[in-house]
Amino acid sequence: METIRLHHPQEKENMNLPASAAAIGFFDGLHRGHQDVLGTMIAKAEENGLKKAVITFDPHPSVVLNPKKRRTTYLTPLDVKLEMLEDMGVDYCFVINFSSALAGLSPDTFVFQYIIDMNIKEVIAGFDFTYGRYGAGNISTLSEYGAFHTTGVEKLAVDGEKISTTKIRKDLLTHELESANHALGRPYEVRGVIVQGEKRGRTIGFPTANIEPEYRYHLPAKGVYAVTFRLDNEETVYKGVCNVGVKPTFHDNLERVSVEVHLFDFDRSVYGENATVHWHHFIREERKFSGIDELTDHISRDKQKAIKLLENL
C-alpha cells in the first residue's frame, strides 16, 4: 500500500494517480461499521476495475473543531490503522492533515481538490459523513457532482444503537468490554514495549510484563482483565491476567496509569521486546487492599477466573 500524506494547500500536479474507488472517513477503530464502508469500497473497485483507496485524516477533526471534547487518544493510532488497511488489500491511503485551513474550505473546494483532482471515480462513505466549512457538505451534496459516483453506507446497529467509535470509547471506560469487542469485531488491542517496572510482582509470586504503550491509545478503564498476549517476533499466543491502574495498595497519589500483565506458564526475561495485549473479559475494578496477603489472595482469584474465562478461546 502506498501512503500519501497531504497538507493544505497542497501541490498535486505530478501525482498522476490512477482511477480509484475511495472510502472516506476517520475510521478510528476500524469497527464493524467501518468494515461495511471499506467492504463496499473494495466491491466497487473490483466491479469497476479501479484501485482501492482510503481517504482519512490526522489528527482527529475534534482537535480543530471542538476544543472542549478534543480527541487525542485513539482506538487505532494512525500507524496501526495503516497496517490494518494494507492487510485489507488497500492500494492507496491518502492521509490529509486536518488543520484550520482544511476545516475552512468550502465544500466545493474540498471536493475538487481532494476527490476530483485525485482521479477518484467512486466515493464511499458512511451515511453521516460531512465535509467542508461547518460540515455543510454531506452524502446528498456529494452525489450532485458529475465527475464521480457516490455511495452512502447505512448505519450498522446493535440492539437499535449505532455502532460508533464514540460508543466503543465509552464502553471501554465503563468496563463494558464485551460490548466494545462485539462492535469492533475483534478483541481490543494495545501495542507496546516491555519495560522494567517496580518488580514487586515477582516478589509476591506474580511476575508481570509491564507494557509501555507505543502510541496514544485509549486505554480500558482501570481494573483487572483476562487477556491474551503476543510478542511481535513470535507466533505463540499467551494467556494472562492484566491490571490497568495506579497500584493503590502501594501508592497513594500515583496518577500515571500502568499496564501490567501476569502471563500463565511463562518465565522469561523479555525487556525491550514489542508485544500486543488483547483484552477479552473484564474481571473487577482496581481497588486498594489492606496489605500484601489480601492483595495476593485476590490476584490468585483473578488468575483462576481469567483461566476459566479464556479456557475455550
Image: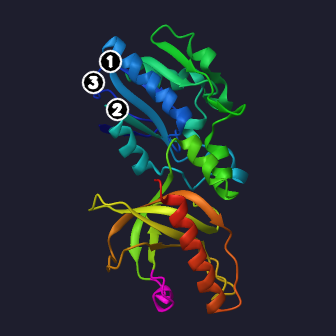
Prevailing secondary structure of the magenta residues = loop
Q: Is residue 310 visible?
A: yes
Pick whichever, 56 or 177, lies toward us. Answer: 177
Q: Position of residue 27 (x, y in %)?
A: 52, 39
Q: Which residue is mark 1?
A: 50
Question: Residue 90, labelled with which disc?
Answer: 2
Dot 2 or dot 1, earlier in sequence:
1
Q: Secondary structure at mark 2?
A: loop
Residue matched to label 3: 16
SS class, disc 3: loop
Q: Is residue 198 magenta?
A: yes
> Disc 1 residue type?
Leu
Task: State the residue in front, 267 or 312.
Answer: 312
Is residue 144 highlighted in magenta? no
- Estimate the x, y position of residue 242 in percent, counting from the top left: 53, 69
**What's the magenta region?**
197-207
